[in-house]
Amino acid sequence: MEIIQIVGIGLMAAVFVVLLREERPEMALQISIIAGTIVFLLMLNKIASALSLLQNMAARANIDFIFLNTILKIIGIAYVAEFGAQICRDAGSSSIATKIEFAAKIIIMLLSIPILMAVLELLLKILP
């Protein structure tokens, strides 16, 4: 059960962060970042499996890979922005975290325009 391993890493890191936050805040932040990175690295195989499955499904459904790649980029941007924002919040910089989230939303909006245009074109073809 990988989730038990991940929760264990998270709990150990949280305990260390709480203990170190008062005397060594820079070390507490580093432990938080390292724990997040370890969890991410543990999930890389799962991410690769999910991407492979999505690509196979898109190929069987004759979905244009441009749309699939765009959706995967959007998902990646959301996860990276959330990770970065949480690190900023852990460091006590919630205003920077908010700006990271705002930037991610703008980038996601720009990336989604071609998909929205394709959906609108499809709707216009269907409607008389």
Image (cartoon, helix red, strand yellow):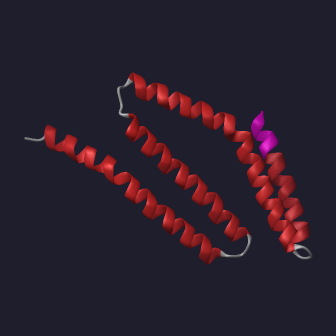
The dominant secondary structure in magenta is helix
Q: In which quarter of the image is residue 30?
A: bottom right
Q: Could you say where residue 96 lies in the image, as x and y percent from the top left?
A: 61, 74
The quarter of the image holding the N terminus is top right
Asked if residue 21 lies left or right of residue 106, the reply is right
Asked if residue 70 lies left or right of residue 50, the reply is left
Residue at image point 76% right, 36% down = 2
Depth check: 14 or 93 in front?
Answer: 93
Q: Residue furthest left?
A: 128
Q: Please, is residue 52 above or below residue 123 in the view?
A: above
Q: Please, is residue 54 above or below residue 30 in the view?
A: above
Q: Could you say where residue 50 lies in the image, as x and y percent from the top left?
A: 57, 33
Q: Quadrant of residue 26?
A: bottom right
**Total labels drawn:** 0
Residue at image point 80% right, 52% down = 10
The quarter of the image holding the C terminus is top left
Q: Please, is residue 92 above or below residue 60 in the view?
A: below
Q: Residue furthest front?
A: 66
Residue at image point 88% right, 60% down = 15
Residue at image point 79% right, 60% down = 32
Q: Which residue lies furthest to the top in this view?
A: 60
Q: Could you say where residue 82 lies in the image, as x and y percent from the top left?
A: 60, 59
Depth check: 105 or 7 in front?
Answer: 105
Asked if residue 48 lies left or right of residue 56, the reply is right
Residue 3 among magenta residues: yes
**The magenta stretch spans which residues?**
1-6
Residue 125 among magenta residues: no
Q: Could you say where residue 76 lies in the image, as x and y percent from the top left?
A: 55, 49
